[in-house]
Image (cartoon, grey):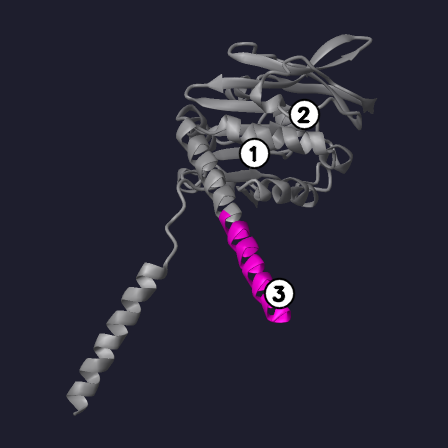
């Protein structure tokens, strides 16, 4: 008797287990983009304070951004292998040979780098890094201004309108025009200053904007949109296509749920109406 009960329980358990397997939703194609931001623990260019202004809108686009505060935490092969792109927004001035190698292996191997504002002043002991970013910070003033979009057809500029903001008026030196396309220029009495650009580095892609001193720019929807466009542009093609498929599948899934909900409400409404009529 006990054996029969045990056998029945085993069979029932197997059946329930089998049903639970069949009940699991099919995995979605692709995946979100994974990004690591290298910031710092400083009030000047406050990466910790500004992080949510970037990370939260990106999360809604299925771009997941993690924040670390030191090169030691970020620029290691065992860490970088988990990410599709890097974001730099910090004042770190030096990079070790091992960190430099890890960074260049990452980007030149096909991954992406998004360098924001003060990133052009980072790692001044590495001429290779300066050349990869495409230029180095030299000096700045401050004020309200609007940079001109000179490449509106570029994917990063899609949906981005010129915007006025208070920011630091960066001037750069050590420009590297090789494989560089300027997207925005800041124009003043001194002339035209490249302000936002993209580069290729080996198999990888680099985006840089001089915008971004503080929340006055980071809170601008067009600045946020530019960064949201930059990340999918810098990642490699398989990652970008996987992300697009993932977003499309989520959209289709949400539409199907909405259709089922609407159909269910219609059915209940019709039943209630029939009950009242009779």
Q: Is residue 155 left or right of residue 8?
A: right
Residue in the foreground of this view, choosing between 264 and 34: 264
Res 186 visible: yes
Q: Is residue 136 above or below residue 278?
A: above
Position in image of residue 214 (x %, y %):
75, 35
Residue in the foreground of this view, choosing between 29 and 179: 29
Q: Which residue is mark 3?
A: 273
Q: Which quadrant holds the C terminus?
A: bottom right
Q: Are marks 3 and 1 in contact (CB under 8 Å)?
A: no
Position in image of residue 53 (x %, y %):
68, 42
Q: Are marks 2 and 3 in contact (CB under 8 Å)?
A: no
Mark 1 surroundings: few (<14), some (14-19) or many (≥20) residues within 10 A: many
Q: Disc 2 and disc 3: Cα gap in Å?
A: 50 Å
In this picture, which residue range is highlighted in magenta? 256-278
Res 125 visible: no
Q: Which mark is residue 160?
A: 2
- Labels 2 and 3: the sequence-earlier one: 2
- Labels 2 and 1: the sequence-earlier one: 1
Q: Residue at point 31% right, 65% down?
A: 19
Q: Disc 3 and disc 1: Cα gap in Å?
A: 57 Å
Q: Which residue is mark 1?
A: 87
């Amino acid at each position: 008797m006990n054996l029969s009960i045990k056998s029945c329980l085993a069979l029932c358990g197997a059946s329930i287990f089998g049903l639970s397997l069949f009940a699991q939703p099919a995995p979605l194609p692709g995946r979100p983009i994974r990004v690591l931001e290298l910031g710092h623990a400083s009030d000047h260019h406050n990466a910790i304070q500004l992080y949510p202004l970037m990370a939260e809108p990106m999360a809604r686009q299925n771009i997941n951004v993690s924040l670390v505060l030191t090169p030691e935490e970020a620029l290691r092969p065992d860490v970088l292998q988990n990410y599709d792109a890097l974001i730099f927004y910090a004042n770190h001035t030096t990079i070790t040979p091992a960190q430099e190698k890890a960074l260049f292996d990452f980007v030149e191997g096909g991954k992406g780098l998004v360098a924001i504002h003060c990133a052009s002043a980072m790692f001044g002991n590495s001429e290779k890094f300066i050349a990869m970013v495409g230029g180095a910070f030299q000096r700045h003033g401050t004020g309200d201004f609007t940079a001109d979009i000179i490449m509106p057809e570029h994917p990063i500029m899609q949906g981005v309108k010129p915007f006025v903001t208070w920011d630091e008026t960066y001037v750069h030196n050590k420009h590297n025009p090789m494989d560089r396309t300027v997207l925005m220029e800041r124009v003043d009495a001194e002339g035209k200053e490249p302000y936002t650009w993209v580069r290729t580095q080996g198999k990888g892609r680099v985006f840089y904007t001089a915008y971004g001193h503080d929340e006055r720019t980071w809170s601008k929807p067009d600045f946020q949109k530019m960064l949201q466009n930059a990340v999918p542009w810098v990642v490699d093609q398989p990652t970008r296509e996987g992300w697009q498929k993932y977003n499309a599948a989520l959209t289709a899934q949400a539409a199907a749920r909405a259709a089922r909900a609407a159909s269910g409400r219609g059915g209940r409404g019709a039943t209630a109406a029939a009950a009242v009529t009779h």
